[in-house]
Structure formats: C-alpha cells, structure tokens
Image: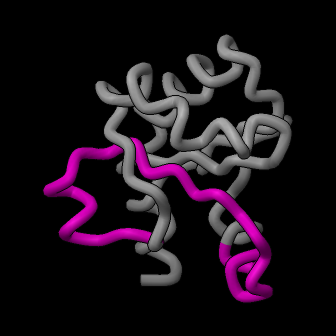
Amino acid sequence: MPDIDVQELNQRLSQDENLLILDVREEWEYAESNLNGKLIPLGELPHRLAEIEAWKDKEIIVHCRSGARSENAKKFLQGKGFQNVRNLIGGISKYLEQYG
C-alpha cells in the first residue's frame, strides 16, 4: 500500500474511521504529543506483535516523529505478513505542523 500523507490522515480521523494508528516512538515522546494511537516503541515491536495480530489483514498506519522509524516498522511488519501497512509521511511532526 502507498504511504499516507497528513491531509488524508486528518480527513480520515475526522470521519471517525476505524483505524489502527501505531506509534513507534518512545514513551516520553508519546507523553509529549500523540494521535491517540497504540504505542509500541520500535525496539519492542518484535516482542509485541501479538497485540496487533488481529489487524494483520486490516489497514495499519504507523508513525514516529519524522517518518524514519516508522518506515523501518512498516518494512518489519510487512516481513511478518502484515499487508496493509502505511507510513505517515513526515511523521507526527508534519501532522502537528499543519493540524497541531
């Protein structure tokens, strides 16, 4: 699946779509600002896949601060059979810049 930009994500959030937003930042970053997503820091992701197993065939939007860690998370999840993983382009920084 193609990655998602902040405009599309904002539109979909405003429509209350049933989305899994996976935040792969650290706990302190999540405490500073978040999109009410599920927090699983990138380093813990390999050990916590069971928590998102139910979403294996559904869309998952993964994000971090700028998009680099979430790109790694996307590739990791795809390697584990998650087919519908999209990275938030520019991360939460870009989202907050526009919709803060």
* Residue 24 highlighted magenta (yes or no): yes
* Residue 56 highlighted magenta (yes or no): no
Percent from the top left, x then y, of residue 60? 69, 47
- Camera-side residue: 7 or 86? 86
Q: Is residue 25 left or right of residue 53?
A: left
* Residue occupying the point 84% across, 38% down: 57
Q: Quadrant of the N terminus?
A: top right
* Residue occupying the point 60% across, 50% down: 88
Does residue 13 lie above or below 72 as drawn?
Answer: below
Total marks drawn?
A: 0
The colour scheme used here is one colour
* Residue occupying the point 43% across, 20% down: 46
Does residue 56 lie above or below 80 as drawn?
Answer: below
Snapshot quadrant of residue 79 = top right
Q: Is residue 61 left or right of residue 29?
A: right
Q: Quadrant of the C terminus?
A: bottom left
Q: Residue furthest top?
A: 79
* Residue occupying the point 46% across, 71% down: 35
- Camera-side residue: 11 or 97? 11
Q: Is residue 7 left or right of residue 26?
A: right
Percent from the top left, x then y, of residue 26? 23, 45
Q: Is residue 52 left or right of residue 85?
A: left
Snapshot quadrant of residue 69 = top left
Percent from the top left, x then y, of residue 21? 58, 58
Percent from the top left, x then y, of residue 67? 48, 40
Q: Residue furthest left?
A: 28
| Region of the chain picked out in magenta, as a range | 10-35
